[in-house]
Image (spheres, helix red, strand yellow):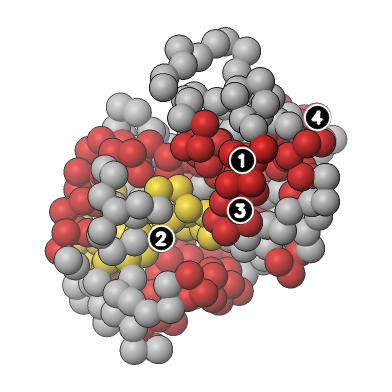
């Protein structure tokens, strides 16, 4: 059954809300479902509720609150209850964006803002046969403290992947900050004698990230580190404007979530700028944005070629901020699909 949708439907703002929407839509056979809609008014009953709670426990990693669906009848309220009933130790960064399909799963690391919802369109363009998982940053939902180094992120994310998929081959990737973290993850997996036939670095690099950050926060105004010293309202307003093209802040995000995203963005950028890559003896596929935001001497292909002898360049449409969004994401997906097929 398809619903036409209405203007008052609120779309997901983070990974947990996204996962709940996907589960509700499949069980209730309705789409789209807003996070503010009542489960029972949508046609849910006690039988579907039992299936719903089982799916939530199995797919999100969150233990269910004692109130269950009866007291948390909307996705928004249920997500809040799930977070309150869990501890930081039980939290997992792994988000099943599109878990179905026969292909080797693609694990894609969050960009600077920490949220993986930016990959939804990329997953859709890759198609229903390509399993796609995001790795969301701790700290985004307020449950955990942010991780401050690339090494710690890689360790945490590899552990999460291996709990779900104990052995390879592994297809890894990431946009912006995520590409640097994916690089370190690939190093660790290969050191454990696992295959990493695809390492997709999407317009990402250490020096390149510094240049992009400068472009987003140019001289003549407050830089990213200066902005974090300003009152919270100013941080939120300025970051919303500067990151609008990249859509790091979801459209319906309240100021509390927007502030967490900005502060996580600064933490993640500092982690990348302090990272020192080691040499890599595998294959790196670099997806470089056609429209330049920075000077020519800063580019991902040249940077990663210093650390790897087999770097393959894919120039895709858009700039650093727009390349994973419409209309450019289809070009990125087409190039990425070829790389993922190579491992099959």
Determine the residue positioned at 70% across, 30% down: 74
Residue to which mark 3 is pinned = 54
Q: Which of marks 2 and 1 is in front?
A: 1
Q: How would you rate the neighbour count of disc 4 (Cα within 10 Å): few for under 14, some for 14-19, many for 20 or more?
A: few
Q: Which of marks 1 and 4 is in front?
A: 1
Quadrant containing the N terminus is top left
Look at the image and tell me whether residue 3 can be seen.
Answer: yes
Q: How would you rate the neighbour count of disc 1 (Cα within 10 Å): few for under 14, some for 14-19, many for 20 or more?
A: few
Determine the residue positioned at 45% across, 48% down: 97
Q: Residue 233 carries which label?
A: 4
Residue to which mark 1 is pinned = 47
Q: Distance between the residues labelled 3 and 4?
A: 40 Å
Q: How far apart are marks 2 and 4 (CA)?
A: 34 Å
Look at the image and tell me whether residue 158 can be seen.
Answer: no
Determine the residue positioned at 38% across, 36% down: 121
Residue to which mark 2 is pinned = 107
Q: How would you rate the neighbour count of disc 2 (Cα within 10 Å): few for under 14, some for 14-19, many for 20 or more?
A: many
Q: Looking at the image, is 118 positioned above or below residue 310?
A: above
| Residue in front for this viewpoint, 153 or 129 | 129
């Amino acid at each position: 059954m398809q619903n036409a949708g209405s203007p008052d439907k609120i779309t997901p703002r983070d990974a947990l809300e996204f996962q709940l929407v996907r589960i509700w839509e499949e069980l209730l056979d309705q789409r789209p479902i807003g996070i503010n809609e009542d489960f029972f008014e949508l046609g849910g009953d006690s039988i579907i509720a039992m299936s719903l709670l089982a799916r939530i426990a199995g797919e999100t990693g969150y233990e269910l609150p004692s109130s269950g669906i009866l007291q948390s009848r909307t996705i928004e309220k249920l997500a809040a209850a799930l977070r309150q009933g869990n501890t930081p130790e039980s939290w997992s960064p792994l988000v099943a964006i599109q878990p179905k399909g026969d292909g080797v799963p693609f694990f894609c690391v969050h960009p600077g803002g920490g949220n993986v919802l930016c990959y939804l369109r990329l997953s859709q363009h890759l198609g229903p046969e390509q399993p796609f998982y995001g790795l969301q940053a701790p700290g985004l939902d307020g449950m955990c403290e942010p991780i401050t180094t690339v090494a710690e992120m890689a360790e945490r994310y590899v552990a999460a992947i291996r709990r779900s998929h104990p052995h390879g081959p592994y297809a890894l990737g990431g946009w912006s900050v995520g590409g640097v973290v994916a690089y370190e993850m690939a190093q660790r997996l290969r050191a454990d004698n696992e295959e990493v036939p695809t390492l997709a670095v999407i317009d990402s690099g250490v020096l390149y990230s510094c240049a992009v950050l400068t472009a987003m926060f140019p001289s003549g105004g407050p830089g990213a580190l200066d902005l974090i010293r300003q009152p919270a309202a100013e941080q939120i307003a300025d970051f919303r404007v500067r990151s609008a093209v990249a859509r790091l802040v979801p459209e319906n995000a309240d100021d509390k979530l927007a502030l967490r995203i900005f502060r996580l963005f600064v933490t993640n950028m500092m982690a990348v700028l302090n990272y020192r890559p080691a040499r890599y003896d595998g294959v790196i596929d670099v997806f470089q944005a056609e429209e330049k935001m920075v000077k020519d001497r800063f580019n991902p292909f040249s940077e990663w070629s210093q650390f790897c002898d087999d770097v393959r360049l894919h120039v895709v449409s858009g700039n650093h901020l727009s390349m994973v969004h419409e209309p450019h994401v289809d070009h990125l997906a087409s190039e990425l699909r070829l790389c993922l097929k190579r491992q099959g």
